[in-house]
Amino acid sequence: MPRWKELPEELDPQVREFTGQLRRLVEHSGLSPAAVADRTGYSKTSWERYLHGRLLAPQGAVLALAEVTGADAGHLLTLWELAERAWSRSEMRRDATMESIQVAQARFALGEYAPDPDRVPAASPSEPPSPPSTVSPSSPPPASSPPPAGRTADPGARQLRRQLRRERMTVWVAGAAGVLLVAVGLLLLALNPSGGGGKKAAAATAPAASAPQSPPPSAPPALPAGVRCTGADCAGKDPNRMGCSGQNAVSPSRGAAGAMRIEVRYSKVCAAAWARVTGAAPGEQITVGADGHSATARTGQGGDGYTPMVTVSGDPAKVTACRTTAAGLRHCAQPAAAKSPATP
């Protein structure tokens, strides 16, 4: 019976519970990780990662383990769905943490080159330089005291500011009067029945005044918690990172060849689909296509993989998902029968 190491402390509770259930199934079966790998078609290295919490086991591996150990596949898949959502949330939190660190580093770098406000001299262009005073040798130097802070000791500066304010007010009044005169002239031209220019101006302005205004664009619908894109914004992006997988996705089409399983994963809330393969050989090509667009990916070392998302505007049953082996053999998913709906 294998002796397990402690799971990482930062592991999500739902992922911890799912991993513990996998360990209990392996212990009760009396199989070693090497024997489990041999019977399920997944490598020993992959199972060591699954059972030590370093990687979330794919759905194909979970189903294969349930078949080998005789466990309830439905209950195990429910735990897997919860763990998959928790794993996606953890990845998003890690991404947000890295973004925050990068922003903080950028702000710190900018702060190093920002000018120190205490070192910038305060400029007072409104105060003209006072002429140097001439003191006769016979007269004693005048006693001078510095003006209080926040006040201008030179009366000439105050007079200059008042003059500038008066000039600005004069310019503003003159401009307003000019605009008023132009408006009155246009109104007189429009009301003059004998003036052709007034009739043309009225005819030109009438359609513009009577034209109905287009309604403001409606705000986009609010997305559920954890979902980060929808429609065209999801094209080419990772479904797990965008929150489109888990309970937000179903499988309208499936296919199998030996231990290999391929399925179309479709998310209505994200209006997007992707292909997912489990139990294949490493490096095999996965392709998904919908509405004239496609995305490809390759399976990893454990034989599992999924493609980026493509936008789906029509029937999700028309989305294609195929796996191509190194020898050129091609296996595609087929739409599920109406009497057996796809399992999320």
Image: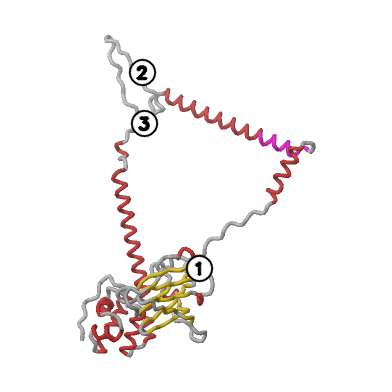
Query: What percent of the width, then of the height, locates residue 307?
Result: 40, 71
What residue did someone put label 3 on?
A: 123
Q: Nearer the viewer, residue 71 or 35?
A: 35
- Mark 1 vs mark 3, foreground winner is 1
The secondary structure that dominates the magenta segment is helix
Q: Can you identify the residue that label 2 sits on?
A: 131
What's the residue type where badge 1 is placed? Gly
**Residue at the outermost right position:** 194
Amino acid identity at mark 3:
Ala
Picture residue at 30% right of the left edge, 84% below the top: 40
Q: Nearer the viewer, residue 180 or 320?
A: 320
Residue at disc 1, secondary structure: loop
Q: CA distance from mark 1 to mark 2?
A: 81 Å
Q: Which residues are magenta?
A: 182-192
User: Which corner quadrant holds the N terminus?
Assistant: bottom left
Comes first in the chain, label 1 or label 3:
3
What's the distance in space between the residues labelled 3 and 2, CA to CA? 18 Å
Q: Is residue 176 left or right of residue 3?
A: right
In percent of width and height, residue 333 lies at 45, 79
Circle 1 sits on which residue? Answer: 292
Tell me the element at label 2: loop
Which callout, 1 or 2, points at the residue further toward the start of the chain? Answer: 2
Q: Residue at x 29, y 36 (%)?
A: 119
Quarter holding residue 6: bottom left
In this rendering, the answer to whether 47 lies above or below 311 is below
Q: CA distance from mark 1 to mark 3?
A: 64 Å
